[in-house]
Amino acid sequence: MDVKYMNPFIIATQVVFKTMLGIDVKMGRPELKKTRQTNGDVTGIMGLAGDQRGTLCISFRKEGALHIYNTLMGDGCNEINEDVIDAIGELTNIISGQARKEFEKSNINLKAAIPMVVVGKDVEMNFITTLPIVSLPFYFSVNGGNEEVMYLDFSFEA
């Protein structure tokens, strides 16, 4: 998989978290996933088409999703509900939009579908491409120090 399709998502994730949420995220070591299952409890999914076809998933564990929602909304929500699900879908869309700006700088044509969100652990994803799926973990602090992780998984046609 060509890094020119990965780097815009890395940059976009860091920019969106910093500017919208005031959160510094640190990327962990990329991994090749051996399964097609989600990493978290709430996952935004988006199909990508253009110069390449692929799928993008942004997956949060419950605490991370709640922290993102509460930071965005200034709320004290403590359970996954429709509002949290909508917020993760919107965040997926915003990260994708920011990544597309980076793609445009390199004259890469990439369009994104409207995101959908699934809730549940180990939900099997049917990526439109075959393996490999690259998983990029991003770490950020929640509630004054507890570290949370968000996973950015994507796969592009070879």
Image (tube, grey):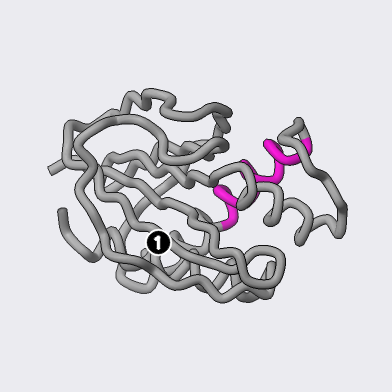
Q: Residue at x 57, y 37 (%)?
A: 42
Q: Is residue 30 above or below residue 54?
A: below
* Residues shaded magenta: 83-94
Position of residue 49 measured from the top left corner of the image (x, y, whole percent): 34, 41
In this picture, residue 144 sits left or right of residue 109: right
State whether the magenta stretch is mostly helix, strand or loop.
helix
Q: Residue furthest left?
A: 158
Q: Tell me if residue 86 is in the magenta stretch.
A: yes
In this picture, residue 106 sits left or right of residue 121: left
Q: Residue at x 26, y 60 (%)?
A: 30
Residue nearest the observer in this picture, 143 or 55? 143
Quarter of the image for the C terminus: give it: top left
Q: Residue at x 54, y 27 (%)?
A: 120
Place residue 133 in its image quadrant. Answer: top left
Position of residue 34 measured from the top left corner of the image (x, y, whole percent): 19, 36
Residue under label 1, please give it.
Answer: 9
Q: Is residue 73 above or below residue 42?
A: below
Residue type at numbered disc 1: Phe
In this picture, residue 76 sits left or right of residue 1: right
Helix, strand or loop under label 1: helix
Place residue 140 in its image quadrant. Answer: bottom right
The 10 Å Cα crowd at callout 1, few under 14, some 14 to 19, many 20 or more, is: many
Position of residue 70 measured from the top left corner of the image (x, y, whole percent): 78, 55
| Number of marks drawn | 1
